[in-house]
Each structure stands twice: as C-alpha cells, then as structure tokens.
Amino acid sequence: MRVRFTDTSHDPDGDPLSRHWSFGDGSAQSGGRTVSHTYDDPGRYTVTLTVSDPKGKRDATTRVIRVGAAEAVFDHIVISPSNATIQPGGSRSYTAEAFDTDGGSMGNVTADTVFSIAPNGSCSANTCTAQQPGAHTVTGTYHGESDQSTLTVEDGAPPSPPPPPQATCPTYALAFHVRPPANQAAGHQFNVQIRVDVLDDGSSDGPLSINLSVQGGALSGGETSATWTGQGIVNFNHLTIDQPGSYAISASAGCASSTDPAPITITDGPNASAKTEGSALGLVLAVPWIRRLRRGH
C-alpha cells in the first residue's frame, strides 16, 4: 500500500529545513515536505520525521500507523460465565462479548449469539436448562465463531463438608484469557480477561481478589481489581495508560501464581490517520519545537 506523508513544520526564523524520513520498515528517505512510501506487508509501523536547520538545531517526531485493515476485524467471542452449577431443572443465563484481532472489545453480542447445550437440556435465547445430573457443555456461536462453558447439574446428594484449611500456597493459577493489545494509543481504553484455574488445595467457590499491575508504569484508569467467586472469567474493562512507552501487564492474587507479563506498547498518537485518495493514505506529521503554519488533512 502506498502512503503519503506531509510535514507542516516551519522554522520561525524563516531558514530552510532539511528533512529525513524513516518509515519503520527499514526504509528511509531524505526529502521535502511531502514524500510517499510503499509498504509491502500489512501491520503497524513507527514513522519518524527528523528536521534540522542551518544552525544545527534538530528535532524529531514519530507517529504509529496501521497499514492494512482500516477497521477492527472480528476475531472471537467469549461467553460468561465459563462455569456454573444449577439444581436439576434449574437454568442459567449467559452473555456473549465479541473481540477483534487485537483483543479489543467490540461490544456485547448476546442478542445475536445462538446458545446450545449438550448432551441434554435446552436453551431459550441466552438461558439454558438441564435436568440430568453431571457436566454439560454450553456453546455460544456468533458469526461462525464459538466459545464454550461448563454447566454442572447437581445430583441432589448432601454437600460434602468443606476441606480443612490448607497452609500451602499457591492454590490457584492465573492466566490471560484475553491479553492486552500489542499496541495502543495513549489514553485509549482496552480490556483484558483473566482465567482462574483451581489447583488441588484451592476452593472452586473462591473468593479470590485479583489485582492488575504494570511493570514500568501505572494504569491511569479502568477496573484494576476484581473478585473471582468461581464464576468463570474475570473482566477488567476500560483500562488506560496515559504515558507512551513499553510496559508489561500482569495479574496477581493471594495464594495464586501470577500471570506471565503481557507486553503492551503505548504510542503517543492515533493508530492511523487521514485522507484516502485513490490507493494512497495521507498522514500529517509536525515537529513539536517548530511553529505550524497550517494543519494538514
């Protein structure tokens, strides 16, 4: 894809500027205000513009662009809860959420998801009912993509006494069900989901208080803590990081092994910009220390 870049910088003293463009794919070019570059492969690229004046003063600015799909592409759904228990003849309602290829939420799609249950039972809209004791599998399908949940029907036997307290840890293991996006603009929201696996000494009922942390920085907004009570996946919504840079997000809880750190790069601008003209995309960059004369389109 051919992408056109335009610099709107101007030296306050009226001196001519020298410009050097780096396109993020290993290619670079020295040129004027407007240059074009062809990217062979789709993906995210960091474009850098460096300018200098005859007095030796120089500065640079960067912009991350996405080459390829202009819009978020649906990838998968997640139905909740991921496991539940009912009495014979009881029912359980489910929700479904769609996610794009970057792990970003595309919203609630429960009304457009078809639910089914096996080996027996029935589903009406998003509510499933089963009579026979044992484990059942609830499947939600949306636009050809499916996710499954376990629905256990109790056999009516008296509950077993709780096990004695255990002094050993860990008794749970945390893992990402939906990881953070690899790249995200500063201040833009994203979601993650944490799966809880119960180990031999853990209680399948919880509760377990889970907290998110950021290596190298901090979350500036969103749901950074939640309590798991045995009802499947834990959602952390509307998360934001304001400062550009490279970070790693992880989740932790008492008596639980933490998730592996999930890397995320925060950029200082939108993922893609601008005006489409034929097969070209326009992008405007400007260096911070130089006064702008006009805004590009």
Image (cartoon, rainbow, N blue to C red):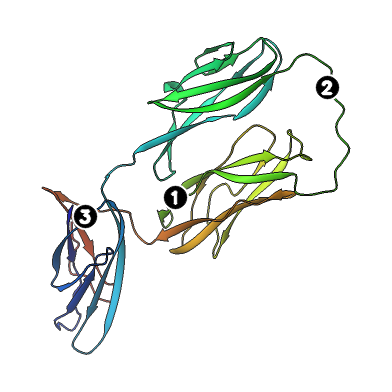
User: In terms of image quadrants, where is residue 207?
Assistant: top right
For the residue labelled by badge 1, is the local secondary structure a helix, a strand or a loop?
loop
The residue drawn where x is 75% and y is 14% is 155
Q: In the image, 18: left or right of 216? A: left
Tag 1 residue: 181
Q: In the image, 87: left or right of 50? A: right
Q: Pointer 1: residues within 10 angstroms few (<14), some, or many (20+)? A: some
Q: In the image, 180: left or right of 32? A: right
Q: Position of residue 122 (x, y in %)?
A: 56, 10
N-terminal of the pair, mark 1 or mark 2, is: 2
* Disc 3 to disc 1, C-alpha distance: 23 Å
Q: Which mark is residue 159?
A: 2
User: In terms of image quadrants, where is residue 196?
Assistant: top right
For the residue labelled by badge 2, is the local secondary structure a helix, a strand or a loop?
loop
Q: Quadrant of the C terminus?
A: bottom left
Q: Position of residue 130 (x, y in %)?
A: 63, 12
Instruction: Single out the mark in the foreground, 3 or 1.
Output: 3
The residue drawn where x is 67% and y is 45% is 173
Note whether residue 240 is visible: yes
Residue type marked 3: Asp
> Looking at the picture, does residue 8 appear above or below residue 208?
below
Tag 3 residue: 40
Residue type marked 1: Pro
Instruction: Single out the mark in the foreground, 3 or 2.
Output: 3
N-terminal of the pair, mark 3 or mark 1, is: 3
